[in-house]
């Protein structure tokens, strides 16, 4: 399994990054693999990867997603509020796009 699915873009303003991108970049900066983070978080590597790429399908509820994002942020020494803010921004953007399609 590849340990890095997201390509880094150093030209992106950190304020524009969504939660998963922030987590992936920090994980890579700390030299951690998805497998190492998964073991510490007691999640499958597939679920950790899903958090990084913004895939909600592997999770049964948004409550779990928020909890896992907070735990992952703490593991990577990132502000939980910043990660959740990125998650909420992306979620709201996706909801608006979905509504516009209807």
Image (cartoon, rainbow, N blue to C red):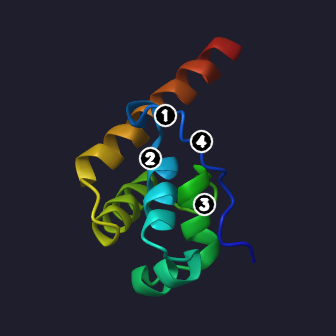
Tag in front: 3 or 4: 4
Which mark is first along the chain, 3 or 2?
A: 2
Distance, label 4 to label 1, CA atoms, is 18 Å
- Residue at the image point whose x is 61% and y is 52% from the top: 53
Which mark is first along the chain, 1 or 3?
A: 3
- Kindly indicate whether the residue at mark 1 contacts the one at mark 3 (C-beta within 8 angstroms): no
Regarding residue 39, the answer to whether it shows in the image is yes
The answer to whether residue 32 is above or below residue 85 is below
Residue denoted by label 3: 50
Distance, label 4 to label 2, CA atoms, is 15 Å
Which mark is first along the chain, 1 or 2?
A: 2
Which mark is first along the chain, 2 or 4?
A: 4
Residue denoted by label 1: 90
Distance, label 3 to label 1, CA atoms, is 14 Å
Distance, label 3 to label 4, CA atoms, is 19 Å
Label 3 neighbour load within 10 Å: few <14, some 14-19, many 20+: some
- Residue at the image point whose x is 59% and y is 41% from the top: 9
Residue denoted by label 2: 19
Query: Residue 41, located in which quarter of the rendered image?
Result: bottom left
Q: Position of residue 92 (x, y in %)?
A: 46, 28
């Amino acid at each position: 399994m590849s340990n890095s699915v997201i390509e880094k873009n150093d030209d992106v303003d950190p304020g524009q990054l969504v939660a998963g991108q922030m987590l992936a970049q920090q994980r890579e900066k700390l030299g951690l693999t998805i497998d190492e983070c998964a073991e510490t978080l007691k999640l499958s590597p597939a679920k950790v990867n899903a958090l990084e790429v913004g895939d909600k399908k592997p999770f049964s509820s948004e409550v779990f997603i928020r909890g896992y994002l907070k735990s992952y942020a703490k593991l990577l020494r990132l502000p939980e509020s910043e990660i959740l803010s990125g998650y909420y921004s992306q979620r709201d953007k996706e909801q608006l796009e979905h509504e516009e399609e209807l």
